[in-house]
């Protein structure tokens, strides 16, 4: 099975440790992962800000970059949500029938990390070790667009040394929303304040999630207030065993 | 694709009614989120009604099938709206009612004003109605010297305060009981000056005030939750019973009905009357459901007028993505779960239709450019879609309205945003350009000054760093790492 890593533009530029953790994790589980060098961005920011026409070349580029892989994995619920639900719409509106067919075919083979692990590879215990008190924020698009449900929690419950604490009002949005955070900074911040309060209420050292973008927002608030609580992507929590960490 | 064979249908006119705000959403929201009392009132009200709804929805085993049935009924009604409306007109006329067609708010206000004037009365009682607020009917009647008295308790609170409703179902959600007591003491004629803030005492005060009105007023104005084409029956679903007083006691009843409210068959109500109360008030069944068909000799109002209101609905229907917003049954479940609404309240939206459904419905009725900030007043978190009883995919409509806004303003002066996104799209078109763009991370690391995080950025990115840090870019992108390490970790 050829697995192509869609590292996402944000993961490439700002959070390379998340892509590295994803590769390390899948390799430990016995899978070779390739990084198609032609990839850039799924176009979600453009599409969700209204620039659908401008997103068309990005959709085309994405579909071409991943055409030859059996499976595509991304450590992001919202980017997978965009590939699965929006690429087809953009291709239908501005593209051609071939692109529509190719976009649909790529979307059908694309999985968010917890989906790949639980649904495709059939693993819930990845053998990881992460000795910290952790709370999990289910990101909106993994929860309500992909319907990953409790898959990330099932993975987290099997992590050695990890103390999982439930996040109050977990399924409420953190206020990121892509360009919403810039266009509506006051409302975004009001939402973030409540999310930060709930994270702190858990007494966790680490808040984890399946999306670097949401973690960047929550982490941005936690850091600004010098809370000492840090954001760590789900892939990083799952990446290392006790032996590897000691080595 | 949409093909217009003639002129595109007109949107709701400016200068009348309440579908447009005076300031863009982000500005109005800035004021709202800093109002501690408002935030407290909203958080309390939305949290409790969310929980009530969730509990009563969970006890219905076929809720998802009901939602699908509701969506199918509404889609079928809209697909042949013209036929259903003429059937409704025929049925209402056959039962002694009179049907009027109003292209927009101006026409509807003129029709209703003329009908009231013909009775010679100067006062009317009103059943809670979104359509009449949308068209600014009370203001139009006032200009003609006619006083409209709201009889829904929350609408009465809003009217006495000279305020605007901030929620579809709970118009005074932004007020708490202490504020209501103070208002009644100041503004309600004949009220006990020692009135307490006990909800029962407040309700009793309103009740004795309203009874006078019901018994002395001979004309009533209402909207309707549903109108059944095959029978000509209108329905009002309510909690208080004040609506039924208005619908039964006066001599003349005038109903202003948005044309999207029509249902083809009486049996469609079986689905709708299950979906609506559980979604709106979190009740298994609403206390009062009043249904009337034209005029019944010797019983209730002896003159009935039905005003069918377009006011931009045909324009919304012409939008292949947006038209689903017309399926809305005004339950307001989406407002109650919306994390944006819960923090800003309804006034920030400027329109009588606030929250997620308002953010799509208002621009569809007025044209996107008259409400251009509303489609962006959402994080696209999807909570609204999850609770919608008729499965309106609000996030997808929001995204499409954003596209319309960007496309429709493409010929005007390029904004900083347009330039930034066009540049980003150019850089992301192929991996070579994107790799070179990655070198810009060096600038970010300079801004972080070795602290690992960026604490200030110039405008427009200062909107982020005003309240949030940003991690400093890494010394090596993933792409560069992959190349350097020989394609393995």
Image: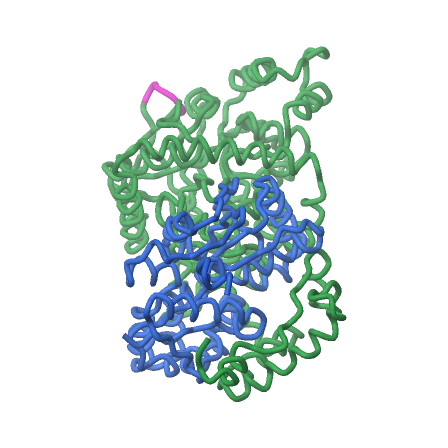
Q: Is residue B299 magenta?
A: yes
Numbered circles on residues, count: 0
Q: Residue at x 27, y 74 (%)?
A: A1
Report the residue at 52% width, 16% height from top.
B215
Chain A: what color?
Answer: blue
Q: Position of residue A31 (x, y in %)?
A: 33, 71
Res B103 visible: no
Image coordinates of residue B193 in percent, x first then y, are 72, 12
Q: Nearer the viewer, residue A43 or A116?
A: A116
Image position of B62 with respect to B469: above or below: above
Judge whether B315 appears above or below B255 on screen: below
Image side of residue A78 versus residue B33, left or right = left
Q: Main secondary structure of the magenta part?
A: loop
* Extreme-bottom residue of the structure: B432
Specify the colour of chain B.
green
**Any magenta on residue B302?**
no
Please report the residue visible at 58 percent of the width from the left and 31 percent of the height from the top: B148
Give above or below for B185 relative to B56.
above
- Left or right of A180, for residue A160: left
Magenta residues? B297-301
Q: Quadrant of residue B291?
A: top left
């Amino acid at each position: 099975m050829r697995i192509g890593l869609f590292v996402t533009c944000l993961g490439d530029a700002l959070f390379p440790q998340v892509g590295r953790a994803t590769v390390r994790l899948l390799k430990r589980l016995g899978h070779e992962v390739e990084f198609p060098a032609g990839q850039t961005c799924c176009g979600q920011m453009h599409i969700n800000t209204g620039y659908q026409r401008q997103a068309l070349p990005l959709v085309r580029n994405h579909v071409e970059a991943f055409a030859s892989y059996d499976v595509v994995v991304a450590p992001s619920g919202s980017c997978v949500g965009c590939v699965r639900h929006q690429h087809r719409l953009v291709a239908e509106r501005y593209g051609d029938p071939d692109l529509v067919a190719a976009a649909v075919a790529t979307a059908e083979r694309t999985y968010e990390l917890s989906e790949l692990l639980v649904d495709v590879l059939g693993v819930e215990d990845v053998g990881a070790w992460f000795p910290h008190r952790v709370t999990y924020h289910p990101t909106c698009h993994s929860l309500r667009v992909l319907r990953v449900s409790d898959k990330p929690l099932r993975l987290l419950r099997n992590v050695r040394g990890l103390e999982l604490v439930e996040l109050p009002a977990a399924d409420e949005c953190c206020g990121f929303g892509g360009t919403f955070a810039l266009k509506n900074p006051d409302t975004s911040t009001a939402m973030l304040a409540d999310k930060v309060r709930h994270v702190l209420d858990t007494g966790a050292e680490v808040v984890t999630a399946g999306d670097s973008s949401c973690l960047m927002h929550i982490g941005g608030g936690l850091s600004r207030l010098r809370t000492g609580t840090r954001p760590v992507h789900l892939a990083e929590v799952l990446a290392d065993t006790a032996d590897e960490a000691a080595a | 694709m949409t093909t217009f064979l003639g002129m595109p249908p007109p949107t709701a006119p400016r200068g009348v009614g309440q579908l447009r705000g005076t300031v863009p959403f982000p500005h109005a929201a800035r004021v709202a989120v800093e109002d501690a009392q408002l935030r407290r009132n909203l958080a309390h009200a939305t949290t409790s009604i969310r929980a009530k709804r969730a509990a009563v929805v969970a006890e219905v085993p076929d809720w998802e099938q009901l939602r699908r049935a509701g969506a199918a009924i509404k889609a079928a009604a809209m697909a042949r709206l013209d036929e259903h409306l003429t059937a409704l007109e025929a049925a209402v006329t056959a039962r002694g009612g009179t049907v009027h067609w109003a292209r927009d708010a101006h026409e509807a206000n003129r029709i209703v004003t003329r009908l009231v004037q013909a009775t010679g009365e100067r006062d009317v009682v009103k059943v809670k109605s979104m359509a009449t607020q949308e068209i600014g009917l009370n203001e139009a009647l006032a200009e003609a010297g006619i006083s409209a008295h709201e009889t829904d308790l929350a609408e009465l609170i809003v009217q006495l305060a000279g305020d605007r409703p901030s929620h579809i179902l709970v118009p005074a959600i932004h007020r708490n009981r202490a504020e209501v007591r103070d208002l009644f003491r100041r503004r309600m004629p004949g009220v006990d000056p020692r009135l307490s803030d006990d909800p029962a005492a407040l309700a009793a005060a309103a009740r004795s005030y309203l009874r006078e009105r019901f018994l002395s007023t001979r004309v009533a104005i209402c909207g309707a939750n549903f109108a059944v084409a095959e029978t000509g029956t209108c329905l009002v679903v309510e909690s208080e019973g004040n609506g039924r007083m208005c619908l039964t006691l006066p001599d003349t009843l005038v109903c202003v009905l948005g044309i999207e409210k029509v249902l083809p068959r009486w049996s469609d109500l079986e689905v709708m009357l299950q979906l609506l109360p559980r979604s709106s008030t979190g009740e298994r069944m609403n206390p009062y459901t009043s249904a009337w068909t034209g005029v019944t000799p010797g019983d209730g109002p002896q003159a009935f007028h039905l005003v069918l209101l377009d006011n931009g609905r045909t324009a919304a229907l012409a939008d292949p993505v947006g038209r689903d917003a017309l399926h809305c049954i005004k339950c307001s479940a989406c407002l109650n779960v919306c994390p944006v609404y819960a923090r800003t309240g309804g006034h920030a939206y400027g329109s009588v239709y606030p929250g997620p459904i308002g953010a799509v419905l208002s621009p569809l009725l007025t044209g996107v450019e008259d409400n251009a900030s509303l489609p962006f007043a959402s994080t696209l978190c999807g909570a609204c879609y999850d609770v919608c009883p008729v499965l309106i995919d609000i996030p997808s409509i929001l995204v499409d309205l954003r596209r319309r806004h960007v496309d429709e303003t493409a010929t005007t002066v390029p904004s900083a945003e347009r330039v930034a996104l066009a540049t980003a799209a150019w850089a992301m078109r192929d991996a070579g350009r994107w790799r070179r763009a990655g070198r810009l991370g060096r600038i970010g690391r300079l801004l972080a000054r070795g602290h690992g995080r960026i604490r200030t950025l110039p405008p427009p990115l200062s909107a982020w760093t005003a309240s949030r840090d940003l991690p400093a870019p890494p010394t090596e992108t993933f792409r560069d790492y992959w190349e350097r390490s020989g394609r393995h970790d």
